[in-house]
Image (cartoon, rainbow, N blue to C red):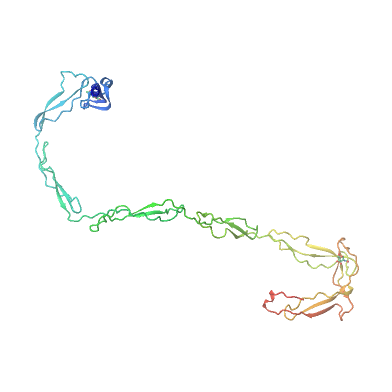
Amino acid sequence: MVIQVSLLVSCFFAIHLSVSEGVSCYGTFDNSTGKCLDFIGDDVTEEDCCLNIKYGFKRSANDPCEACYPAEWSEWSPWQGCSVTCLEGVQQRRRECYGQGSCEKDQTMLETRSCTQDCCPQNGGWSNWLPWSACSVTCSKGIMQRRRECTNPAPQCGGTCHGNNQETTVCDINQVCPTHGEWGNWGSWSACSASCTKKGSSDVPKYLRYRQCNNPPPSSNPPGIFCPGLGQEEKACSGLPPCPVDGGWGAWQKNDECSVTCGIGVETERRECNNPAPQHNGRECVGAKIRTTVCNTGLHCPIDGRWSEWSEWTECVRPLRDKIQCTKVAGQQKRTHLCERKAYGGLACKGLPTEIRNCYNTKGCIYQGTWSDWSDWSLCIPPCGKSEKTRQRLCKPIYPDYPNNTGIQRTSPTFFWGTPNALCQALDGQRRKVEEKADCLNTLPCNADMDSVSYNSG
Ligand SMILES: *[C@@H]1O[C@H](CO)[C@@H](O)[C@H](O)[C@H]1NC(C)=O
Ligand SMILES: *[C@@H]1O[C@H](CO)[C@@H](O)[C@H](O)[C@H]1NC(C)=O
């Protein structure tokens, strides 16, 4: 016990010492109010605080602020009010001695001078009351006010009007106040509006919930205000799988060039199922991936030349010799054909337009003849119904044994040309031609379909 008491005593002593030595130091002494400003710190020695003579300090919280600078009078305060409101009185002003040490002894801190007021206060009189204000409410009971002014007459030399310049009274509109609506509680969230999310769609699946303006509902007479705000709220659904995206065809793209370089051909176009490509188990595109379309080069294709039929051989003649008919002298003849149809850069005909050959002229000559074998049967005439066919044996001339490869073109064969008269022994009484006719058997009837049926000439 004894030890504890001595501890307490020494502790108290230590605190007392520090309070007596330390001051609260401030950065500014305000010489117009005598107050310390700009607190710096406690427990500073007076000497340390006043190392700057602009500073001030307090010895304890309730003591006045002391300036660090050497004692000096403050400025005079303004003159105070006159001691009377009417006729002659006095007024005073003060100054304080701030700082360390004391100010000069024979100077004073208080000055007094006399003052006079020109006139004495006279009270004014009230004007009439102004009209009542509107009632403060539009239903049930409220208040209204009216005012009057101190102008009749106005007070003089600081006088006033006695009484209130304002009056208040209760007013009753005699009407029930409307009830404004208040929201009820939110209902529970609905099911999500969709089961999957469409990529890139602004239509995001959501939950909805509603509330009603029924707690209370707005009164109808007099009409109350409907609840402010929305009766519906939405929230995006989360964690939905993406929706299937069905495939769509892209544009047709040319795949191959036109199959021809002239005239009309085909070209193929291809499209891909990528607009969009099917996703998330969406359907594949339906339809063809490749199509062919007609392409037209607009160019006429070349037409190659083609030889016309040969003309008849010309008369077999020997230039510079008059007559070679029925002689052993070889002559020459020619025939021609024309390259026809060539157009649009087509190829020319191959070969020469003229052919020349060696010949013996047998026109009208008389030779021994010999009967030919039967010719093949002719066609059935007419081609349908009852019809006939023919075949012949002809009296053919036996050409004389003239040398071959003679004439102007030595290396080419020499041909007999012309129509000689052939002398044969009479056959069935004929000298030139024996003809046999026969019915065509099992012919086909003539009808409209004949053209499409092939028939046998026998
Ligand atoms: C009071 O303080 C102001 C500046 O803080 C100074 O200009 C003035 O001279 C001081 N007045 C006196 C009487 O010390
Ligand atoms: C010469 O030979 C050709 C066939 O090589 C023949 O057609 C022609 O009749 C012959 N001419 C003569 C004069 O024998």
Residue 275 drawn above or below residue 427? above
Q: Quarter for ligand 1?
A: top left
Point out residue 143 in the picture as x, y percentages from the top left corner. Answer: 17, 49
Identify the image quadrant of residue 401: bottom right
Q: Residue at x 9, y 39 (%)?
A: 123
Q: Residue at x 9, y 36 (%)?
A: 121
Identify the image quadrant of residue 153: top left
Name the residue nearer the viewer: 435 or 235: 235
Point out residue 260 in the picture as x, y percentages from the top left corner. Answer: 65, 58
> Would residue 355 be visible to someone looking at this image?
yes
From the image, which quarter does the C terminus lie in?
Answer: bottom right
Q: How many marks?
A: 0
Q: Residue at x 20, y 51 (%)?
A: 137
Point out residue 112 in the picture as x, y percentages from the top left corner. Answer: 12, 25
> Would residue 131 be visible to someone looking at this image?
no
**Left or right position of 258 against 326:** left
**Left or right position of 214 against 207:** left
Point out residue 27 in the picture as x, y percentages from the top left corner. Answer: 27, 25
**Left or right position of 390 against 169:** right
Residue 114 drawn above or below residue 124? above
Identify the image quadrant of residue 420: bottom right
